[in-house]
């Protein structure tokens, strides 16, 4: 793959200049809007009573504020951090007791990862379960698109890779299956690296942070999923794959028992 130059170049025609203008507006407008919002929140707190039937929901871990129905009780972990659903790069709080499997995934700034709870509703014919598997880069997992069902699944492994070795061990000892991805597992999400721009970054006071985020793969197109999977390098640490797996009946009973004891 050819190297990509990140430094701005020079333009010699109108089309090139228009493209650079759009890129500049994107790079400056979004942080500016964030700054304006931050100032508004600081000096003129949100008057949530003006929106009938709504209340403010704040995530202590990130400081993000969401609007929810009055009386809604968001799900939190023992640290008081919100539980999330995720689609592409977007995430939103989950109401306490919402249907779905809970998985813990380490996300946040590269040098300050914290476990956060994500909720995934099962989509495969039952019984099935959702689990998180952490693998070093390069993972060696072969993925295949099922366009008819609108999903992406594990179809094999690169010979000699960590994923293949774990898969072979799991076949010999089923107790270790949860530490491996298996052929047929459906990809529901995965961690990738993103640059998060704080409002101060607009003025050069704070550089954008290299951050691990969870990408929700449900109903996402193949090019977008592959693009997100390529974000990051070995120095960013392991990749966590969230997969859904079909189970035999006896396996499902054991999984339900473990889920009942889920403690976060």
Image (cartoon, grey):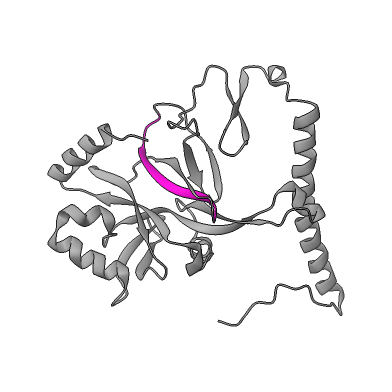
Q: Name the residue at 80% across, 57% down.
A: 25
Q: Position of residue 257 (x, y in %)?
A: 20, 35
Q: Which residue does the image show at 62% across and 21% down from the upper left?
A: 54
**Which residue ends up furthest to the bottom in the rendered image?**
2
Most prominent secondary structure in the magenta stretch? strand
Q: Compare residues 211 and 153 and report the one nearer the observer.
A: 211
- How many labels were placed on the picture? 0
In this rendering, does residue 125 appear at all? no
Residue 102 among those drawn in magenta: yes
Q: Quadrant of the C terminus?
A: top left
Q: In the orientation shown, which residue stands out farthest toward the front?
A: 111
Q: Residue at x 50, y 53 (%)?
A: 215
Residue positioned 37% across, 66% down in the render: 143
From the viewer's side, name the closer residue of 216 and 176.
176
Q: Which residues are magenta?
A: 98-110
Residue 50 on the magenta span: no
């Amino acid at each position: 793959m050819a190297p990509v130059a990140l430094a701005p170049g020079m333009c010699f025609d109108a089309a090139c200049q228009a493209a650079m203008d759009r890129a500049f507006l994107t790079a400056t407008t979004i942080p500016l809007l964030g700054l304006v919002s931050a100032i508004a929140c600081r000096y003129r707190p949100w008057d949530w009573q003006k929106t009938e039937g709504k209340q403010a929901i704040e995530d202590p871990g990130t400081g993000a504020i969401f609007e929810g129905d009055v009386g809604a009780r968001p799900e939190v972990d023992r640290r008081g951090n919100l539980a999330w659903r995720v689609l592409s790069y977007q995430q939103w709080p989950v109401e306490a007791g919402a249907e779905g499997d809970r998985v813990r995934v380490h996300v946040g700034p590269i040098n300050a990862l914290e476990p956060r709870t994500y909720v995934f509703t099962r989509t495969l014919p039952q019984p099935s379960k959702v689990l998180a598997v952490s693998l070093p880069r390069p993972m060696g997992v072969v993925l295949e698109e099922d366009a008819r069902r609108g999903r992406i699944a594990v179809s094999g492994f690169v010979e000699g890779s960590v994923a293949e070795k774990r898969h072979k061990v799991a076949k010999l000892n089923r107790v270790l299956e949860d530490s491996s991805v298996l052929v047929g597992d459906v990809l529901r999400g995965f961690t990738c690296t993103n640059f998060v721009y704080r409002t101060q970054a607009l003025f050069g006071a704070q550089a954008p942070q290299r951050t691990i985020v969870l990408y929700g793969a449900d109903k996402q197109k193949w090019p977008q999923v592959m693009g997100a999977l390529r974000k990051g390098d070995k120095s960013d640490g392991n990749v966590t794959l969230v997969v859904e797996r079909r189970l035999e009946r006896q396996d499902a009973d054991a999984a339900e028992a473990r889920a009942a004891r889920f403690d976060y």
